[in-house]
Image (cartoon, rainbow, N blue to C red):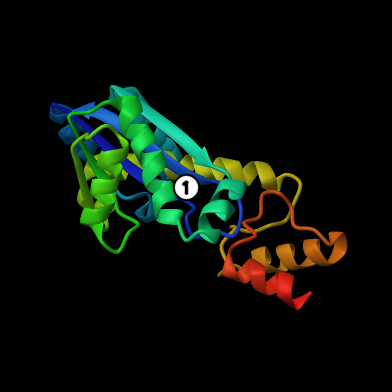
């Protein structure tokens, strides 16, 4: 029985990609993931996430990681289709890994609806969609680690040239960076999500 776990990273960020990651493993390997100490990426330090990333890749049968660009995110947000965009990319992961069953972390207020959408987009694969799946199922926790490490690396790359903080609206370093950049250049950098409310406010205030 091949099981897939899927999660995202960077959904609430003002900048950088939204990362979707999926892992495929045999049901009998789930215990190995648990005994390794794999848990929701939010409960792990960056160092531990890096450690688990390597271990997970060695242990699982297959994995697939995909990034959604700020440009695609903006196009979807304008149509109020962000959940649909995420469902599409999660379906892409399912189709790629072709499991018997997939557990996904739902970004929709209605997990059942979100699961049905992914199923319809992935040739009727069996999908189990839940809120907080990343802390409920080790297979989703493992996917959350892959997504988070990939997202952190993407931000790290941007940080080489810019002092942009974590990328989240709650981070004053990020807000300051976006505000200053726009004031100086009269244009937003391509890695900033222009449809995000805090970014819209900066555009409006200047």
> In the rendered image of this protein, does residue 205 appear above or below residue 65?
below
Q: Position of residue 64 (x, y in %)?
A: 40, 30
Quadrant of res 121: top left
Q: Is residue 170 above or below residue 61?
A: below
User: Can you say whether 189 is above or below 6 in the image?
Assistant: below
Residue 42 on image: x %, y %: 38, 55
x then y, percent, for residue 99: 23, 28
Work out which quarter of the rendered image holds the C terminus and state it.
Answer: bottom right
Q: Give the side of residue 1 with respect to residue 78, left or right.
A: left
Determine the image quadrant of residue 50: top left
Above or below 26: residue 165: below
**Residue toward you, 177 or 100:** 100
Task: State left or right for residue 102 relative to residue 187.
Answer: left
Viewer-side residue, 158 vs 184: 184
- Residue at position x 49%, y 52% from top? 10
Residue 106 visible, this angle? yes
Is any atom of residue 47 visible in this view? no
Locate the N terminus and report the quarter of the image it occupies.
top left
* Residue at figure coordinates x 65%, y 60% from the top left: 194
**Residue most extreme to the right:** 184
170 or 115, which is in the foreground? 115
Would you name the residue on which mark 1 appears? 46
Q: Residues within 10 Å of mark 1 (few under 14, many from 20)?
A: some
Kindly state the secondary structure of the residue where label 1 is placed. Answer: helix
View extreme (bottom): residue? 205
Q: How many marks?
A: 1
Position of residue 128 in the picture relative to residue 106 (left or right): left
Q: Residue at x 60, y 58 (%)?
A: 167
Q: Position of residue 91 (x, y in %)?
A: 34, 37
Question: Residue, x 17% and y 29% (percent of image)?
Answer: 100
């Amino acid at each position: 029985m091949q099981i897939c776990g899927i999660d995202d990273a960077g959904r609430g960020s003002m900048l950088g990609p939204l990362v979707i990651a999926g892992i495929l493993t045999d049901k009998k390997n789930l215990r190995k993931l648990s005994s390794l100490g794999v848990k929701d990426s939010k409960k792990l330090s960056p160092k531990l996430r890096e450690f688990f990333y390597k271990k997970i890749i060695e242990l699982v049968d297959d994995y697939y990681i995909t990034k959604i660009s700020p440009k695609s995110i903006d196009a979807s947000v304008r149509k109020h289709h962000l959940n649909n965009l995420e469902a599409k990319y999660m379906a892409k992961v399912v189709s790629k890994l072709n499991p018997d069953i997939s557990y996904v972390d739902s970004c929709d207020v209605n997990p059942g609806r979100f699961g049905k959408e992914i199923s319809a987009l992935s040739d009727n694969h069996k999908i189990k969609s839940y809120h907080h799946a990343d802390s409920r199922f080790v297979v989703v926790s493992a996917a959350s680690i892959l997504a988070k490490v990939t997202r952190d690396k993407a931000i790290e790359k941007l940080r080489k040239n810019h002092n942009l903080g974590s990328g989240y609206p709650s981070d004053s370093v990020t807000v300051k960076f976006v505000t200053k950049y726009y004031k100086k250049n009269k244009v937003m950098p391509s890695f900033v999500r222009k449809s995000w409310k805090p970014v819209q406010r900066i555009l409006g205030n200047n």
